Amino acid sequence: MYDVESPDGEVKEYAANVIAENMLGQVDSEGFTISLLDSILDYQKDGHAVAKKGQYATTKRGGRQLRKTTCGWKLLVRWKDGSKSWIPLKDMKESHPVEIAKFVKARGIDREPAFV
């Protein structure tokens, strides 16, 4: 695990493979920077998203465990070609973790169970 500091000063832990995937996803075969993602515009969640009041599950031993799930969340993404599409959060978290971290912090949803 590595600590990654975003431009706003927030520090989060990421595994080496997530960092590498993010870096490789931003360059072409010759090492030049490319980025298909222009920006994250909006979010939506449906009835499958874990609510804050249900974010903890009780274990068999009676303890509380945080339910980490991205089910029910989608992000509206604008691509470099100008098109827009709704992408499941689970897919975006793998390919663009830094951009998502900035977006959820700016929107004030960083305390939602999907992002904790």
Image: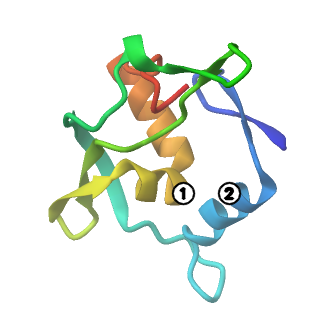
Residue 78: x and y, percent? 23, 55
Tell me the crowding category of disc 1: few under 14, some 14 to 19, or many 20 or more residues within 10 angstroms, Cα based.
some
| Secondary structure at numbered mark 1 | helix
Say which amino acid is labelled 1. Answer: Glu
Q: Residue at x 39, y 11 (%)?
A: 53
Residue 115: x and y, percent? 49, 30
User: In the shown orientation, is residue 99 left or right of residue 82?
Assistant: right
Q: Quadrant of the N terminus?
A: top right
Q: Earlier in the sequence, mark 2 or mark 1?
A: 2
Q: Which mark is residue 103?
A: none
Say which amino acid is labelled 2. Answer: Val
Give the colour scheme of this rendering: rainbow
Q: Residue at x 72, y 64 (%)?
A: 20
Q: Residue furthest right?
A: 1
Residue position for label 1: 94
Q: Residue at x 44, y 53 (%)?
A: 90
Q: Nearer the viewer, residue 44 or 108?
A: 44
| Residue 76 position (above or below residue 18) | above
Q: Quadrant of residue 98?
A: top right
Q: Residue furthest bottom?
A: 29
| Residue 17 position (above or below residue 15) | below
User: In the shown orientation, is residue 21 left or right of residue 17?
Assistant: left
Residue 30: x and y, percent? 64, 88
Q: Residue at x 41, y 28 (%)?
A: 104
Residues at discs 2 and 1 in contact (Cβ within 8 Å): yes
Residue position for label 2: 18
| Secondary structure at numbered mark 2 | helix
